[in-house]
Amino acid sequence: MSLARYGRWSGGPDPLAAPADVRAAIDALGERMLAGESASAALHDVLQSGLEGQRGLRELREALLRRRRELQRSGTLDGTLQEVRRLLAKAVDLERAQLDTDPSPQARWAQTELDLLPDNTAQAVQELAQRQWHCAEAESTYQQIRELLAREAMTQQFPGFGRRPPGDAAESGQTPAGDPRDQLKDFLADLNRLLGAHARGEDTREQFAEFMARHGDMFDSDPQDVDELIDELARRAAAAARLMASLTPQQRAELQQLMDDMLSDLDLAAEMSALNDTLRGLRPGYDWSGRQRMSGEQGLSFGDGTAALAEIAELDDLERSLTMRPIGSTLDDVDVEAVERQLGPAAAREVRRLQELDAELRRQGWLHGEADELELSPKALRRMGQSALARVLADLESSTRGSHDDRRTGSAGELIGSSRPWLFGDEQPLDVVQTVRNAVLRTAGAPAAAAGERARGSIALNVEDFVVAETEHRSGAAVALCFDLSWSMYAQDRWAAMKQTALALDHLIATKYPQDVLQLIGFGLEAQVMSRAELAAVQPSGVPGTNLAQALRLARVHLRRHPRAEPVLLVITDGEPTAHTLDNGRPYFAWPTTTATVRATVHEVDECTRHGIVINTFMLGDDPGLHRFIEAMARRGGGRVFAPHPERLGEFVVRDYLRSRRSRR
């Protein structure tokens, strides 16, 4: 038998992962756009919040911030200086103890030299460099300082330095072949040549491959090209610069002198200085001078402190990219590998799923346009309208006032006694008797098998047998929906209900009653005819004004274009008219409202009444001025007035439209 072995999938995206739920994303986008957000802002919010069962970018950012706080509390940045001071004090104490047992004048003089050591740690270490030690243990302790500084000077920039054999870079004395100091000088010289060639724009692919073959063990990561190498080096160099800037002036001066002296002793000062200058030039956008506050009980070494600050900088970069600010930024800017380093593979999968969702919304044609000016496609608008209508119909279904649908036979019109062959798309009732008669006549001369079927009481119907009963002609409707876009609609949380209602009615008419003609009219300081896309994208303007007069004029023009259709005029508003259009075409606004505005609006109400157009109004709010005006308008024009709660606005508007269809002949 052959054995099968299973392991973690590593061949790219998980082939068994659930596909991106773009429909759920579009529904979430629609809810936010109903509340007044643009498509770009709505998508940004969906990606930040995530979908059901999936973390969004906001939750991932919170995890990054928690990790950042942990690093900030991991220790102080003067750990190397603290350790140097500890070793220096230990070496001096051991030397003093040895000298106390020696009564010779040379011992007294050596003791005096210790007494005269400067308080500055770096200067004291430098003065002791040429000392003739009397205590072997003290000398060994002092050498630990030099070893520590040599290690810290290099590992802060090259983490792999501590793993490179042989020997110790701080040893003094003879320099055999393969001495670490020569190896470091060769390494830095090769690195500076590589970076210099890259800065000059030369093709460095072959040179990079040779460099990594010789010196790849000096790096923790595995850079794949010169740019990745520069990114790693510059991040650590900038972190080291921030570490120095975060120390007190005295600490910074002492540590800088210690490092400079050690690099000079290693004959590496010039190469390291050239490297830092090159990195600053290649990555000027990095933070080279910022300060970072750190806390904790333990002092971090120079290398560990640099690593911590580099990690904090990476966390900050990730946090900014996951914020996706300004709106219009894309998830392509997020470094998924960095997310995996900081938060683990689960978080990286979440980001990839959101990237896939973002890409699928465009690839499948739900969104189009630039990132900061996204627009819903017609398909997405239909989905948005369908969802809005579904919510409205769900309210109707649960309402105790009865069903929204009229299921009476013959609802298409009164029968007139004649019939005609059925055509695809017909809504008229079937003429059952004539349909069966056609099938019987068609099969009358058929073979015995068909006759046997008739004997058993079954008749086979074909498409050509079907006949529909003709009804009296009933015209469609011309519908105008005027909705208030004034700032108060948004400020009083009525905006979403208004947009949902308008989209639901638009979708209902487009899909169920295509013979009806709907025009959407939004009115604020001015009124305008709006398409479905414009309705979905409209946002609060913050400009005051309720120009109902102009909205009624536009509605009247639309309804009169269809003289054979039943006129239906619906108005949604939450405030009395406060604006009208002057003779020169410019809008005029005043609060409290003026006689001129009221007169202009009443004139349009009268014009609608004169042409047989009844205005049904849906009031949102309890403003006394609104109630007085709307009730007077209803008495003048014979329309009906509704005062629904915003959550039931869609139910009232759709119910009124359906009622008008049922009552039409």
Image (cartoon, grey):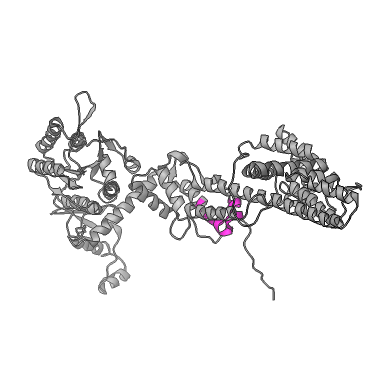
Residue 105 lies in the magenta-colored region = no
| Residue sitting nearer the eye, 314 or 55 | 314
Residue 350 lies in the magenta-colored region = yes
| Residue sitting nearer the eye, 253 or 181 | 253
- Height in image: 108 above or below 17? above
The majority secondary structure of the magenta stretch comes to helix
Task: Find residue 124 and report its image quarter.
Answer: top right
| Residue sitting nearer the eye, 609 or 446 | 609
Residue 355 shows in the view: yes
Position of 152 with respect to 607 (left or right) is: right
Q: Which residues are magenta?
A: 336-354
Q: Looking at the picture, how far across and down is residue 136, in whole percent?
A: 87, 56
Q: Looking at the picture, how far across and down is residue 557, in whole percent?
A: 19, 34
Q: Looking at the picture, how far across and down is residue 153, in whole percent?
A: 75, 46
State the residue lying farthest toward the bottom: 1
Residue displayed at 30% across by 48% down: 496
